[in-house]
Image (tube, rainbow, N blue to C red):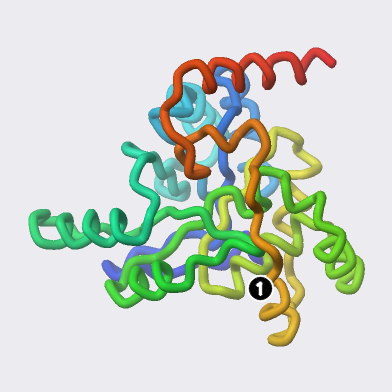
Amino acid sequence: MILEESYTLSNGVEIPKLGLGTWFISNKDAEQVVKEAVKIGYRHIDTAQAYRNESGVGDGVRNCGVKREELFVTTKLDAGKKSYQEAAVSIDNILENCSIKPMVNQILAHISNTPEELIQYTKEKDILVEAYSPIGHGELFKNEKIKEMAEKYNVSIPQLCIRYDLQLGLLPLPKSENPEHIKSNAEVDFTISKEDMEILKNMEAIEDYGAASIMPVYGGGFDLKSIISYIFQRIASIFR
């Protein structure tokens, strides 16, 4: 089972192969979501300062009933450097000036968007690649070819997307607040054929991530007006 598998970082520390993403999970809900995920078997939780839920995630970690040393928690600072050149320069700068080598590099990597050059560069530096938004912020649900491929393997689209990243040697971080979805996202014990991996890798790229396109993690800029508009859209969707 994937929740029992791990990667070994260059410093010898083991990190679970699958983590729970918590972007856009509110601080007040984060504790319960983390507790549910840990109950299912997750031992890796991902958060960030920008998510504004680190406190809630921390409460979930403290109150989940599992020893802290059994849980892997990651958080992040700057989300603005996304291009290959920016990332490569940043990594080189860290390697040249820090006393502790970075262990992971988190990037946008999913079916139809596989930055192979950056992935290879990072791996050559002996740094593990984590993949955020492995389901393309939900946009991959709209792709009929991906739907057909998922049906071929008798799995859901999220399961296909997560398995794709795993077979690339990446650590996917699918986000969900729904316990059933959190559980389903970990049921990825199947293998995508080499031929189908190439088909998925070369799927037509997502050009528009919807309202989320304005966010830096999807290549957008910090346009305050657009971000506020996006937040209101998110709030409105909750009450529909």
> How many numbered callouts?
1
Q: Quadrant of the N terminus?
A: bottom right
Give coordinates of residue 36: x percent, y percent. Answer: 68, 36
Q: Residue at x 34, y 72 (%)?
A: 121
Q: Residues within 10 Å of mark 1 (few under 14, many from 20)?
A: few
Residue 149 in the figure: left or right of residue 222? right
Vertical placement of residue 221 versus 163, above or below? above
In the picture, measured across the screen, residue 86 lies left or right of residue 239, that is left
Report x, y in % for residue 232.
64, 14
Depth order, front residue of 199/155: 199
Residue 178 picture quarter: top right
Q: Please state which of residues 162 and 182 is positioned toward the viewer in this rendering.
A: 162
Q: Name which residue lies at 36% across and 61% down.
A: 84
Up/down of 163 relative to 66, above or below: below
37 lies left or right of 117: right
Q: Position of residue 163 (x, y in %)?
A: 68, 67
Question: Camera-side residue: 102 or 194?
Answer: 194
Q: Secondary structure at mark 1?
A: loop
- Amino acid under label 1? Asn
Name which quarter of the figure residue 20 lies in: top right
Q: Which residue is mark 1?
A: 202
> Where does residue 80 sit, x and y in percent of width and height?
36, 40
Residue at x 67% of width, y 37% of height:
210
- Quarter of the picture containing the C terminus is top right
| Position of 93 relative to 165 (above/below) | above
